[in-house]
Image (cartoon, rainbow, N blue to C red):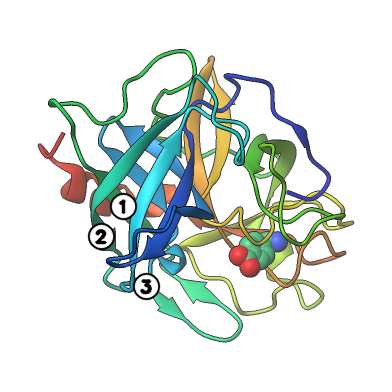
Amino acid sequence: IYGGLKAIPGAHPWQVSVQVRPKGSSQGYKHICGGTLVKPCWVLTAAHCINKNFEYSVVLGGLNLVQKEPTDQTVLVEKTIIHEKFKETPDVVYNDIALLKLKATNGECAKENQFVKAACLPSEPFPDGAECSISGWGATETSEHGSMHLLDAKVLLISHEACSSNKVYEALLDDGMFCAGYLKGGVDSCQGDSGGPLTCERNQTHYVYGVVSWGDSCGEKNKPGVYTRVMKYLDWINKNIAEKK
Ligand code: 4AZ
């Protein structure tokens, strides 16, 4: 996160660290992306975070990536589901959304508490200009390797029109994406935040409105972050998590 601050404990209880290790290895898992807990056994993330040569786990309830904390829960991923129309090109990522099904132990995946709690799926759009929140352990203005502490920042939703102007992303955006941040630059998501949440709040309820997806660099003028538009994928999400807890 560029232009962020250390998150307060319990402020983003749906934030997860998506971690990987090579398939069949006995190494420790390492952070690769963010994700959002949307049901006790389901995490929403970006499709570009998934690679079939890795096995996945998620860490819930933690703020510090390098120290074990009493609130941490580590849960293995049983299955990854990538959107059928996910496509990466050198400039754009389309349909950048995936689900991680967590592996239950004694009938439970995530145990919800003050530090671990699912975000709601949105059912209504938020207006352009709405102030929303991004969070993650990704690159910062002072560290391309990312932050050991979870950082967060406020961003504004940017209209499709403004973000498709000649100075910004021209014709690159489709209706499964939206931009958020500031055209002047400075506050943005970055590498390592991918897959993580952009949440917007209404009536004390937090909705996962976007998934950190891509952008031309980070924090630069006229290059805001681009987010997967979760509202567009509700049927896909609901179909995949239906009665699978
Ligand atoms: C990345 O490389 C990435 N500024 C993520 C977010 C943004 C740019 C790049 C948005 O994963």
Which quadrant of the frame does ligand 1 lie within?
bottom right
Camera-nearest residue between 129 and 207: 207
**Callout 1: SS:** strand
Residue farthest toward the left in the current orientation of the protein? 243
**Callout 2: SS:** strand
**Callout 3: SS:** loop
Question: Going 73% across and 62% down the picture, which residue do you hit?
Answer: 162
Question: Going 56% across and 77% down the picture, which residue do you hit?
Answer: 92
Residue 130 visible from this viewpoint: no
* Nearest to N terminus: mark 3 or mark 2: 2
Residue identified by numbered label 2: 81
Disc 3 residue type? Phe
Residue 3, image x and y in percent? Answer: 83, 45
Residue 226, image x and y in percent? Answer: 62, 61
The answer to whether mark 1 and mark 2 are in CB contact below 8 A is yes
Residue 182, image x and y in percent? Answer: 81, 51
Q: What is the spatial separation of the Cα atoms under label 1 and label 2, in whole angstroms?
A: 5 Å
Camera-nearest residue between 105 and 200: 105
Residue identified by numbered label 1: 99
Q: What is the spatial separation of the Cα atoms under label 3 and label 2, in whole angstroms?
A: 11 Å
Dividing the picture into quadrants, the one containing residue 168 is bottom right
Residue farthest toward the front in the current orientation of the protein? 26
Disc 1 residue type? Leu
Question: Going 85% across and 64% down the picture, which residue do you hit?
Answer: 220
* Nearest to N terminus: mark 1 or mark 2: 2
Residue identified by numbered label 3: 86
Q: What is the spatial separation of the Cα atoms under label 3 and label 1, in whole angstroms?
A: 12 Å
Residue 169 visible from this viewpoint: yes
Q: Is residue 72 above or below residue 158?
A: above
